[in-house]
Amino acid sequence: MSGRGRLAVSAALATLLAACSLLPLVKEAGWLPQAAFLLAAVSGAGALARRAPLPRPLTALAQLLVAFLLLTWFFARGQAVAGLLPGPDAFREFALLLSEGAQDIGEYSIPAPVTPGIRLMLVGGVLAIGLLVDVLAVTYRAAAPAGLPLLALYSVAAGLDQGGSRWLWFLLAAVGYLLLLLAEGRDRLSQWGRVFSGAPPAPSRLGAGLEPSGGGRAAAPLRTGRRIGAVTLGIAMLLPAVMPSLGDGLLDGQRGTAGSGPGAGTITTVNPLVSLQNSLNQPENREVLSYRTNAENTRDLYLRIVALDQFDGSSWKSSERPIRPVPDELPPPRGLSPEVATARIDTSISASDSYRQSWLPMPYPATRVEIGGRWSFEPEGRTLVGNRRQTTRGAEYRVSSLLVQPTAAQLAAAGPPPADLLREYTEVPDSLPPVVARTARDVTEGASGAYEKAVRLQDWFASEGGFVYDTQVEAGSGSEAIANFLEQKEGFCVHFSFSMAAMARTLDIPARVAVGFTPGTASANGTMSVGLRDAHAWPELYFENIGWVRFEPTPSRGTVPDYTVPDAPESGTTVPDEPEPVESSEPSAAPTDREDCPADQRFLGECQVPPADAGSGATGGGLPLRTILLSTAAAVLLLGLPLLPLVWRTRVRGRRLGGAGKEPRDPAGEVLAAWRELIDSAWDHGFPPDDSQTPRRAAERIVAAGGLEEPAAESVRRVAGAVEQVLYAPVPRPAPGLADDVRRVRAALHAAAGRGTRLRALFAPRSAVRVVWACSRGWWALTERWSAAWTTAVLRVSRRVPSRQRG
């Protein structure tokens, strides 16, 4: 294959590797082979045009024409002339497909189904990028700028995909680009003459002054390009892994996204289990939110983020639902009757710059939200979700909400829920162990209605069942995890809320799980401070004429609602003046008693508000074992990586000079090892080797450049003389004392250098690049062997094929 042929194949391959980053965006991968076929056809058309040869602009135009004809054949065949030539109807079909594709992108979440419109956009986009890369890299022989369209293709996919495998797609795209650069470099070098063709000779063991001329030095630019590419790719892959970063807070692992259009799209699913547990186990209760409210009593002012309403047996997650623009006034809560007492609450909330996630924490149920940015409203869960990577970072917003105050009698008298709601929110998977439903029936035996059953479940988890709150328990939210939790009776809020919701569903009570924050702690300046350890999950059960009602089964967390306590006085809510904007979120410096604390908790001494450094909302203290181990591993990695060059040079130096004072077994080998160590020591101190010089000239250069005086200068000359004797004498003679000479020279170079040079020679020696060179030579030899084996196999097969020519 010619140089340009290899370059064209590399261009198409690089485009396909970069296009793989689009795979997570859609559910099916059948569009990728179709795009590969069209890329191959367009690349072949370019090869034929260049072979003709056509002028460069005409070559690009011919490829564009072939691409358009192929797209017409695949996507508008019925509207084209003879199925191939585009006419007015074909253009209208393309416009319709593109319009439908844009609409589908706005309506579907990631991963989206491959509709005809989305398929055209995927295949056409990849084909356009591949055509541009081929024109730049092959036709105009500029492979470096061809990386820009590849980068654009990867950036679009990486910007939309929030998954954890983006590093894999970056690696594929980077490998494709490096292959393209390598192919272009080989093509350019092949045009300089025969000296640059063929495999390079075996590298010399000596280094400076002893390298033979010819192909090895001629192929140096190619090897250097590979080394630069390998080092750059390695740095790009490893640097983000060792750089410290802050998490996005609760739900940081899986953020919800919405369509790009204003108010169009759906909310993706979310599983907050791991992120919530990490938040609860943070050693520092970092503030994420602060707010002011006109509610005198904040014990029921939970900040709700999202509702998890789908249980598939492996986890609870939110359903994919349509969203729309945020209205001025949110619709009334579903199922809420005017007969139920409510109070309007106004709250001004401020999110910290370190808290970034795509759902907006709000009191439930919100009736009005004033916020800037790109937010959409999901009516069923009454949540706000960010569009186009909109997050809560630094957000300041105002929420009007209702404090719903049902009585126990109203809940007990609630009628049956609507059929559609009952069907959706009482569904449980077949994998749910029978022990869950059996336990639910045992706990609620004798209860007269849904309300009494719900209260019994809550009390059983919170106080009567012997459960223990523990955030160090292994996370799990599936069917087996619920069964294990009911048996072991240890867990944190996720286990309590998930289990109670699942058990309520088995009793035909509509249930879902809400995720958010408890009300937080009061600060000295009148604001409420919410930290990471205030993250919480709680079940919500539906009662007709009241709506979704909060329950609190988790012991020592949150507050038990008044309507679940028989004959409890209703908590009144007074409405003072308008809330002021949040100016400061500094927590109080000393613990105080909460005025809203129940009497039983006050008696146990659990009503104190801890100072800022004590955190809130979690039991237990100290660092978890996983955090300690991860921190230790990170510290070892960060401290060990910079010391690798020092360790490597120390080991190599000891091996090269290890024969000092002993009877030499291989005189030539020990002399050459000492010479290599002398050259590398000079290189480490800023005097790079020169392969064009003889050993004697190289020694004089080291003496002059390093400013060496006797006896160090004489030691350099003695080592160089020993090298010449080994190379040219009929029988090499031992040269004792060379190791001491090398150490003397290294000490002199070290003493004459500045402090910065000495530190670099010790911790970042320049000669350590030989490790990269050795890996590059090994890879080169491996690829050459595979290439030779493949060529041999192809020739053998071709000889076995009988000729079709007749004599």
Image (cartoon, rainbow, N blue to C red):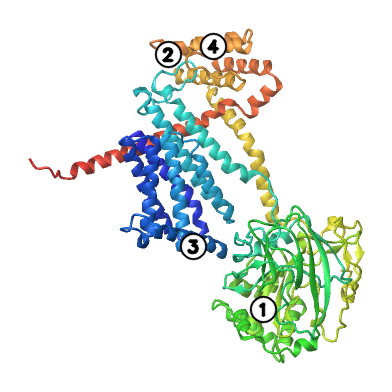
Mark 2, residue position: 727
Above or below, comparing residue 228 to residue 581 in the picture: above
| Secondary structure under the numbered disc 1 in the rendered image | strand
Which of these two is toward me, 378 or 311?
Answer: 378
Q: Earlier in the sequence, mark 3 or mark 1?
A: 3
Which amino acid lies under the numbered mark 2 shown in the image of this protein? Leu
| Secondary structure under the numbered disc 4 in the rendered image | helix
Residue at image position (58%, 79%) is: 428
Which of these two is toward me, 757 or 230?
Answer: 230
* C-alpha gap between disc 4 and disc 2: 16 Å
- From the viewer's perspective, tell me whether residue 606 is left or right of residue 765: right
Q: In the rendering, which numbered label is found on residue 511?
A: 1
* C-alpha gap between disc 1 and disc 4: 84 Å
Which amino acid lies under the numbered mark 4 shown in the image of this protein? Ala
Q: Quadrant of the N terminus?
A: top left
| Secondary structure under the numbered disc 3 in the rendered image | loop
Q: In the rendering, which numbered label is found on residue 699?
A: 4
Which amino acid lies under the numbered mark 3 shown in the image of this protein? Lys
Q: In the rendering, which numbered label is found on residue 27?
A: 3
